[in-house]
């Protein structure tokens, strides 16, 4: 129990590292919480005009979720911990990104971190989420719609891809929570989508 709690806390702390804020400081860019959408994420970083900063933010936020789950998976096997520990680590890292202790509990919308944990839980699941995002974005050029579509479909993909073993119920529950939180964090985007005011990325 103590080991599981420590892993969950470690995953949360890892998730609390906001790469948008860290990279903005390294680049000498404005705090992403103070411009554009106010969201410390890759899409808002792109609005600064620095594509490399946006790319690093995307990779960093995804990798921290990936690493949190992979480390939890290793620890569970190495120390004989319950099989559901990686699932809890996935949730911990995701909550850390949304509510980072290092930045006043005001984090991003969780799309990249969710992608990282999905890839770590099952590469097929993460791959389908990425493919969904890419297809929707190619058709619409709307980042939020792409993210929302991938989030909604992730539990569906998991249902058909993953084994329906003793841990399947917990995994389904955690994926449902992740998807729901992504939807909640995108409330303003959903309102804009419904009113036809959501921003579209133009090719340059």
Image (spheres, rainbow, N blue to C red):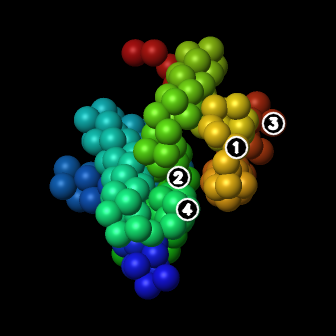
- Number of the label disc, if any, that sits on residue 180: none
Q: Earlier in the sequence, mark 3 or mark 2?
A: 2
Q: Residues within 10 Å of mark 4 (few under 14, many from 20)?
A: some
Q: How much space separates mark 4 and mark 2, taking CA atoms?
A: 21 Å
- Number of the label disc, if any, that sits on residue 110: 2
Q: How much space separates mark 1 and mark 4, taking CA atoms?
A: 14 Å
Q: How much space separates mark 3 and mark 2, taking CA atoms?
A: 21 Å
Horizontal and vertical percent position of residue 136? 62, 22
Residue of label 1? 164
- Relative to 16, say whether 111 is above or below: above
- Number of the label disc, if any, that sits on residue 84: 4
Name of the residue lying farthest toward the front: 80
Q: Earlier in the sequence, mark 4 or mark 3?
A: 4
Q: Nearer the viewer, residue 29 or 126?
A: 126
Q: Nearer the viewer, mark 4 or mark 2?
A: 4
Horizontal and vertical percent position of residue 5? 46, 79
């Amino acid at each position: 129990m103590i080991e599981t709690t420590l892993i969950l806390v470690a995953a949360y702390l890892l998730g609390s590292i906001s790469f948008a804020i860290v990279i903005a400081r390294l680049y000498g860019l404005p705090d992403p919480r103070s411009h554009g959408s106010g969201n410390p994420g890759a899409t808002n970083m792109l609005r600064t005009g620095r594509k490399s900063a946006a790319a690093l933010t995307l990779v960093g936020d995804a990798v921290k979720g990936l690493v949190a789950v992979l480390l939890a998976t290793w620890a569970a096997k190495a120390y004989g911990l319950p099989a559901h520990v990686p699932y809890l680590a996935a949730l911990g890292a995701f909550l850390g990104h949304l509510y980072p202790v290092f930045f006043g509990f005001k984090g991003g919308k969780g799309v990249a971190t969710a992608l990282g944990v999905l890839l770590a839980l099952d590469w097929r699941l993460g791959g389908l989420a990425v493919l969904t995002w890419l297809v929707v974005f190619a058709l619409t050029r709307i980042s939020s719609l792409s993210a929302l579509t991938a989030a909604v479909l992730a539990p569906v993909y998991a249902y058909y891809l993953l084994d329906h073993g003793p841990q399947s119920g917990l995994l389904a529950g955690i994926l449902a929570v992740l998807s729901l939180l992504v939807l909640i964090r995108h409330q303003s985007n959903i309102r804009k989508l419904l009113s036809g005011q959501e921003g579209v990325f133009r090719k340059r």
